[in-house]
Image: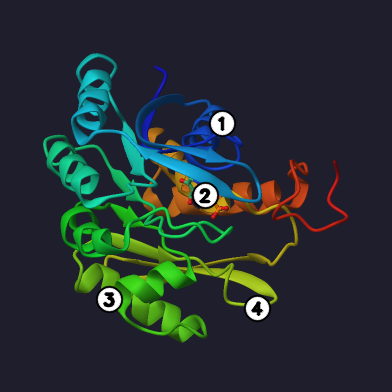
């Protein structure tokens, strides 16, 4: 039977991040993708030109429509944009018991804020406690935990705090922003740490956070354990950064293939 994964996230008109990246990733794993669009962005690989948030009622209706007919084996959240959307999504996902991966999207690599400043607290209190897994990068983990992260030990402290103090079931603090020769991701689940290592590869990186959390979600939808889903997603994203084609003019090393 075909498995289904839902992404509750923003649209990137450039097709590199957001729901577009999520749907392509779901397809790559043979999973049928469902969407609840939270926000429409006018965006390319270099900049976000406009953001138009969808009304919370319509976000909820999208989730309910697909759950009630098609069914959801696992879901993820990406760009949630504002407090009203976060509250509506939290209230809705609470009714269902699918695994929920929360990518705590805050600021795009281009510098554009994808979460309103005043919505940070709502994200922490309303969504994180429902997360099967939270997938922050270094700056996001710093915001969520309140710690500065300079090394793997700091990343461990942050992951543990996101679980034990904010109430997520598990957290993975990604190592791509740590400036080490290896990208070491730290997973904290069931009171234990696990490390996922890959060489730090140069490549096109727009949308990598979205694709990583979508790959985990797709694998959870297929019934894999959290640890297996993360391991598969880590390989997928490392290859994606290395082999991904150059699209547009942003976030790629100059020698990346066209
Ligand atoms: N646009 C949307 C709609 C997103 O959901 C995301 C995800 O984080 C981004 C842009 C950010 O992309 P990046 O920071 O990888 O460039």
Tag 1 or tag 2, which sits nearer the N-term? 1
Q: Is mark 3 within 8 Å of ligand 1?
A: no
Relative to 57, say whether 140 is above or below.
below
Numbered circle sitting on residue 180: 4
Count residues near mark 1 (Cα–Cα under 10 Å), then give few for <14, some for 14-19, many for 20+.
Answer: many
Spatial CA span between label 2 and label 3: 22 Å
Residue behind mark 3: 161
Percent coordinates x, y for residue 147 in the rendering: 36, 83
Kindly identify the residue that appears in the image at 21 percent across and 72 percent down: 164
Kindly identify the residue that appears in the image at 47 percent across and 53 percent down: 230
Q: Are marks 3 and 4 in contact (CB under 8 Å)?
A: no
Residue situated in front as seen by the camera: 232 or 151: 151
Is residue 248 left or right of 113 when viewed as pictured?
Answer: right
Is residue 252 left or right of 48 when viewed as pictured?
Answer: right
Residue situated in front as seen by the camera: 155 or 107: 107
Residue behind mark 2: 212
Count residues near mark 4 (Cα–Cα under 10 Å), then give few for <14, some for 14-19, many for 20+.
Answer: few
Numbered circle sitting on residue 24: 1
């Amino acid at each position: 039977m075909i498995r289904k994964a839902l992404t509750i996230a923003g649209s990137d008109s450039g097709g590199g991040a957001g729901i577009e990246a999520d749907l392509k990733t779901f397809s790559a794993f043979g999973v049928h993708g469902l969407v609840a669009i939270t926000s429409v962005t006018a965006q390319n690989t270099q900049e976000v030109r406009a953001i138009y948030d969808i009304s919370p009622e319509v976000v909820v209706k999208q989730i309910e429509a697909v759950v009630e007919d098609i069914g959801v084996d696992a879901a993820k959240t990406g760009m949630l944009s504002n407090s009203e959307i976060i509250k509506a999504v939290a209230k809705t996902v609470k009714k269902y018991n699918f695994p929920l991966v929360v990518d705590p999207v805050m600021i795009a690599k281009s510098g554009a804020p994808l979460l309103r400043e005043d919505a940070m607290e709502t994200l922490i209190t309303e969504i994180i406690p429902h997360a099967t897994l939270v997938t922050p990068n270094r700056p996001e983990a710093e915001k969520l935990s309140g710690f500065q992260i300079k090394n793997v030990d700091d990343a461990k402290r942050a992951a543990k705090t996101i679980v034990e103090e904010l109430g997520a079931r598990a957290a993975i603090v990604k190592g791509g922003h740590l400036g080490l020769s290896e990208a070491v991701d730290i997973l904290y689940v069931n009171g234990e740490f696990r490390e996922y290592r890959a060489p730090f590869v140069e490549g096109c990186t727009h949308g990598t956070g979205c694709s990583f959390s979508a790959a985990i979600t797709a694998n959870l939808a297929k019934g894999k354990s959290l640890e297996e889903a993360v391991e598969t997603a880590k390989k997928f994203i490392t290859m994606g950064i290395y082999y991904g084609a150059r699209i547009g003019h942003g976030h790629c090393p100059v020698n990346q293939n066209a």
